[in-house]
Image (cartoon, grey):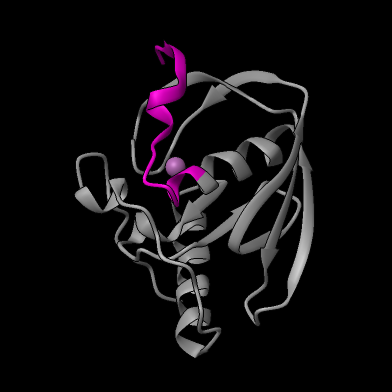
Amino acid sequence: MALREIRTKGDEILYKPCKVVKKFDEKLHILLDDMYDTMKEANGVGLAAPQVGILKRAVVIDDGNGKLELINPVIEETSGTQTGSEGCLSVPGVWGEVERPNYVKVKAQDRNGNWFYAEGEELLARAICHECEHLEGKLFLDKVIRFIDE
Ligand code: CO
């Protein structure tokens, strides 16, 4: 288990688009394992590679129903809307209401390069959208309707 430093708001790496993952090798597997451990240690639901300083299209999510790794994810379908509180490990202590689709279908590769589909509703749909936006260099702050005072 290795923890990596989580980059925070203001770090320029968080605002850059990520590169497509082409090598599904040991280095990628170590990155994904480290990202998962780092996310768990920080009590997060999702983490994208740029948040640990790596500009690659890789995401890990765990909404409480198990680990989901998404490499080169593409959201193919969405439906419905949900409005709820959202935060980000790169923006500690800040929570805001964000509108997201209530359902998301995403196509992605697993850690070995095999394409698969994943579906999510509610928190999982929210997390998939949030993490995919990190890969485009976007933070959720742009989408906040109302900031929530803790
Ligand atoms: Co985030």
Which residue occupies 70% across, 41% down?
Answer: 124
Q: Is residue 58 above or below residue 27?
A: above
In the image, taking residue 106 as reference, residue 139 lies left or right, namely: left
Q: Is residue 13 left or right of residue 90?
A: left
Which percent across, then down, holds residue 39?
48, 55
Residue at point 41%, 16% (across, down):
150
Residue 89 in the image, given as x and y percentages of width and height: 40, 43
Q: Nearer the viewer, residue 148 or 115?
A: 115
Residue 147 belongs to the span the image colors magenta: yes
Q: Give the number of marks.
A: 0
**Magenta-colored stretch includes residue 21:** no
> Is residue 85 depicted above or below 139 in this figure?
above
From this view, report whether residue 115 is shown above or below residue 141: below
Q: Residue at x 39, y 39 (%)?
A: 138
- Of residue 3 and residue 103, the one placed in the foreground of this image is 103
On screen, residue 136 above or below 121 = below
- 148 or 12, which lies in front? 12
- Give, as a single range, the part of the protein colored magenta: 133-150
Comparing 138 with 29, the one in front is 138
Q: Quadrant of residue 80?
A: top right
The answer to whether 92 appears left or right of 118 in the picture is left
Residue 71 left/right relative to 78: left
Quadrant containing ligand 1: top left
Question: Percent position (x, y) of residue 95?
Answer: 43, 23
Residue at the (46%, 55%) spot, across then down: 48
Residue 26 locus on image (x, y percent): 50, 89
